[in-house]
Image (tube, grey):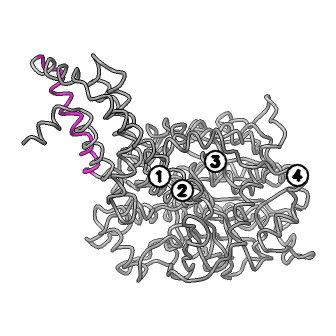
Amino acid sequence: MRLWNAIKTKPILWFSLILLIKGALAWFVIFDDGPSWMTVLTEIPFILIVFCLIEWFASKRKLLYYVIVNLSITLLYFAVLMYYKYYGVIVTYHALEQADKVTKVGESTYSLLDPYYLLIFIDIIIFAFYMVRPKYIARFTSIGMRKINRTALLATFIVSAALCIFNIWPNHASMNENKKAEGMGILNYEVYTIFADTTEHEEVIDMKEINQPSIDALKGGEQPVNPALWAAAKGKNLIVVQMESFQNFLIGLTIDGQEITPNISKLAAGNFYFNNFYSNAGQGTTSDAEFVVNTSLYVPHHEAATSSDYMDKALPSLPRLMSSNGYNTATFHTNSVEFWNRTLLYKAIGFDKYYDQAFYGDDDHIAFGASDEVLYAKTVPELVKMDAEDKPFYAMVISMSAHHPYRIPEAKDKIKLPAEYDGTLVGNYILAQNYADYAMGQFLEELKSSGLWDDSVIVFYGDHQGLPLYSLDNKEKGLMQGIFGREYGYTDMFNIPFIVHAPGVSSGKTFEQTGGQIDILPTVANLLGVSVKDQIHFGEDLLNSTSNLLPMRHFLPTGSFVNDTSVFLPGVGFEDGTNYNVKDNSISAGGSTEAQYNAALRLLNMSNSYVKQLPELPLDGGPVSGAEAK
């Protein structure tokens, strides 16, 4: 009873206890071992430092300051929980630059919310209820006026500061952001990232050191002097189809006797199919995939490519490369061009024309715009017009209906899944991809009937993962285990298909070597007979390579990469990292080398350094809207 009386009359104690509980909830969701005594030793010292400052300097409004700090840290923990559910990493202040996207993808964001996350706001609601009632205001004011012994306060501050330093310094060199946050404590980590970004700067590699031979050497591959299939489809149009959230396990998948993606699976069986292919998208997800495919450059570290200073640069790109070889270029997307700053992206990479929501309208609305059926129905006539001109064309077509959280109108369901899939993210995902495949089937028929199929190199690939490990509950993980026959893991999550149709060339053949979105540019350039020898690219021609190294960004800790046999995730460094076999996601003792680890980090730095030293983009110019053609 005496202890309780001491606690309830000292805000520093009960607010610390409240925030400790909230910190424990965050640890339970994020870290493998959940909350422990480490939670107390890492989270509480930071909280006590802030509260000691309130006790030392505040007087009349002391309790109000406690409530403000409580609300601020609660919102931070809540953001950490929500961000981790999709991205699998700890949110930092960098993500605030993308805060406006939350309102635009509201349904997708809210679907990540587990109801028990809202429990961290209960105390704030209770405080708000009592603090507006006059009879409690005087009592709270009285509690806030009580002083704590200055010596005890100073001692608490010093010990807490020492513990924060002790938590931060030994962990600051860790490459794995999640390990770093666990060692430092979430609150210490958030503050550390701010100061680290102002004091620790990545080396900018001199342009003289950034050349194609050095890049190829780091990746461990070497392009042949006389590459196979060089110019095998010379003069053909190029159509690049980016499939929303499409993962490779959907190819050939049958559930309850129903083929989930029959059209795309048929494509894979009858053309060049790369089944060990990975997403290179980062925080910008779909727009990052557009960036990587069109530039063969890596995305920046802490932000989406379209929200970075990359957009101020005249980027060497696939549209510019094709334009210089006599092609017209255009990109097609049913969302607004302003979303993810695509206005800047399309100018930076040099498209001639774009088609967006202003062209497609909002008929048959799914996700953020017109459905895939509308996308393809309105796109093909524009492609036919481009094909009628005296130059070949490069067109990028971006699907969107199968976007998270995969809420397709029931009237568009083409299959019926077993009852255990009802109401699950996995079930919704499969239904959405089945609909996207149905729309794709219509697109393929229109391409064939219009003659474009026989006159175009057409590539298909998934933009990024659709079912993040971190978003699945136990039931959903069980459904995935039933599909795979084993535990669903990192190698499955990032594995997307890459399919290439080249008329008269791409008879059914499966390629087993490792590849990624960054390799698409040099691969299609080889088929079309378009030289990239004078254009820096961090990918390689997959038709003429047997080895690869793919650094990963954002969704995995810094230092992660994919090689020919493994997906590697670092621990504090390389030595305590983990290799996941690309065949079955099993953990293996070997599979990667420290030289590859260092090479992956060097490649990311080299790409970033290269972009930063490119000339600025002219202020005038840019693509025109296809809506003007309506």
Q: Residue at x 19, y 19 (%)?
A: 141
Quarter of the figure that contains the N terminus: top left
Residue 108, visible in the rendered structure:
yes
Q: Nearer the viewer, residue 193 or 312?
A: 193
Residue 200, placed above or below residue 573: above
> Magenta region, mostly helix, strand or loop?
helix
Give the residue type that dot 1 points to.
Answer: Asn
Give the residue type that dot 3 points to.
Answer: Phe
Tell me which label, 1 or 4, sits earlier in the chain: 1
In front of the other: label 1 or label 4? 1
**Taking 530 as reference, is 239 left or right?**
left
Residue 167, numbered label: 1
> Residue 22: x percent and y percent?
30, 47
Residue 170, numbered label: 2
Residue 332, numbered label: 3
Q: CA distance from mark 1 to mark 2?
A: 7 Å
Tell me which label, 1 or 3, sits earlier in the chain: 1
Q: Residue at x 66, y 74 (%)?
A: 563
- Assign a secondary structure to mark 2: helix
Tell me which label, 3 or 2, sits earlier in the chain: 2
Tell me which label, 3 or 4, sits earlier in the chain: 4
Residue 417, placed above or below residue 471: below
**Is 121 part of what is drawn in magenta?**
yes
Residue on which disc 4 sits: 326
Q: CA distance from mark 1 to mark 3?
A: 49 Å
Tell me which label, 4 or 2, sits earlier in the chain: 2
Give the residue type that dot 2 points to.
Answer: Pro
Do the residues bearing badges 1 and 2 touch, measured as CB atoms within 8 Å? Answer: yes
